[in-house]
Image (tube, rainbow, N blue to C red):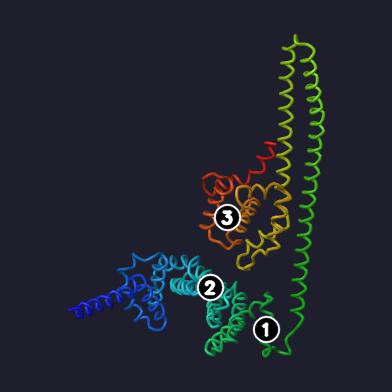
Amino acid sequence: MTRHIIYILAVYAALFALACCAPSPNEAFKTRLATADTLADRSPASAVALLRPMEKDLQQQSKFVQMSYQLAKLRCLTAPQPTDSVLTVARYFTSHGNTRHRLQAYRLAIATLTAHSRHNEALRWADKACRTADSDDSTADTIKATLHLTKARLLALSPMTTAYAYNELKQAAAYTQSASDTQLAAHIAHDLQTVSRQLKLQPHSVLAFTAMQLSGGDKSPNRPIRPAILLFIFITLLLLNAVIVLYALFKKKSNALFIADIRSRLYAAQIQNEIEPLKKLVQRQRQMLQEQKDTNTDRFKTITEQQWQLERLSEHVRSLDSEETIKRNTEAQQQLLAAPIVTVLHEMAAHPMRCQFPSETQWGDLATTIEQAWPDFYPTMNLSSTLRTEEYRVCLLIKADFKMSEICYLLDISNSKLTNLRARLHTKVFGKKGGAKDFDRALRVINTKEHSQT
């Protein structure tokens, strides 16, 4: 009897151990999803068969797992998919997941948009994919070369961007040298020849001349040189004339700013000259009133009238101080807008295709320029709590009157993230609840209010 009981207990213990070791439903779902993700490129049919029964448990999973499921499912389907669902997945993995997820989502968005003839949007996603792959050392050179080749083919669709397509193909060719993929290298070489021929039809392009020099073998020794020399002289004269005109405009603007600065200084000096006698008069009146109070109590009414006049004079002094403060803030704002670092950052944001972003030195120059114009700006921003570098840069760009689209590009963040960040900063800096526009208005007038109160 005891032996049977021991056997039964042993069976129950074994069953309990198996139950404890069995994977949870969520872990089993993730395991099957990882297997389907691996099969998506090699055997799409098998991946679809594995994903189909998992759809009933999808709503119980996290947002990241749901998006990973959608990405794997869209990768398995060969027909062009609706752009809305594909772009939703691509935008999600822009700020979630690792580099592999981002590249898979970007490549899916490029293929779908290209299939729907939305080449401009596909080009933007291709540019994001290239920048993501170039910044990640663990990404294979074959993938980097393929992404640059895709971007080059999208650029080659427009005659205006043929030179950019040539640069992308050169970058792809550089990656294939270490990738040892002969078939991909042959495709890139064929596209390079095609783009080079197109560039030769554009003699005004510097890259076209470079491509013709690199091709080398088809130059004719009897080609006339005189038209090329005349064209070079004509272009040189045009550039020289443009430089002279730009210099004249810059000189005129500098002179106008100098004259405005002189006028503002003279006006400030005039206000200061008016303030000093009034201050002395106020001090003298106060002394007289104090003496009259001590010596003659019968003149209380007269003293009261003089105090009233004194308050009027003090109010006049404060109004003059307020006008001077407003003038100084206007001058500081004008100097900030004319600062070289502000002009450089506006130029970067105006040409996003150059993919130029501010360096740490340029961020420091912008902070120095604003803090020189408003010395209390940095202490005021960090009074309640110390701001992070990204938050303080948002404050600097808003104070310098940058557009929201320019701020998104310079900080390489999305518009929704910038809106949420501004709303959080309104609570963090000013201790009040409000929206993004409330923060912008409060930030632009913060130093003006402080000077007016003083």
Q: Do the residues bearing badges 3 and 2 touch, measured as CB atoms within 8 Å?
A: no
Image quadrant occupied by the C terminus: top right
Residue 35 is situated, as x and y percent measured from the top left of the image, at 38, 79
Taking the view exactly as shown, the residue that stands out farthest to the left is 1
Q: Characterize the local packing of mark 2: few (<14), some (14-19) or many (20 or more) Cα atoms within 10 angstroms.
A: many
Q: Nearer the viewer, residue 206 or 164?
A: 164
Is 155 situated above or below 344? below
Question: Label 3, on which residue?
Answer: 404
Q: Residue at x 53, y 71 (%)?
A: 123
Residue found 40% across the figure and 68% down from its top: 65
In the image, residue 359 lies at what x, y percent?
67, 65
Q: Position of residue 96 (x, y in %)?
A: 48, 66
Q: Nearer the viewer, residue 227 or 430?
A: 430
First along the sequence among labels 2 and 1: 2
Q: Earlier in the sequence, mark 1 or mark 3?
A: 1
Q: Amino acid type of disc 1?
A: Met
246 is higher (above) or lower (below) than 71 = above
Badge 2 is on which residue?
129
Residue 287 occupies which quadrant of the picture?
Answer: top right
66 relative position to 156: left or right: left
Pick the residue in front: 217 or 141: 141
Q: Are marks 1 and 3 in contact (CB under 8 Å)?
A: no
Report helix, strand or loop for mark 1. Answer: helix
Mark 3 Cα within 10 Å, few/some/many (few <14, many 20+)? Answer: some
Disc 2 residue type? Answer: Ala
Amino acid type at mark 3: Met
Query: In the rendered image of this protein, does residue 348 appear above or below residue 224?
Result: above
SS at circle 2? helix
* Residue 281 versus residue 405 in the image, above or below: above
Mark 1, residue position: 212
Q: Residue furthest front?
A: 2
Which of the two marks, 2 or 1, is nearer to us in this view? 2
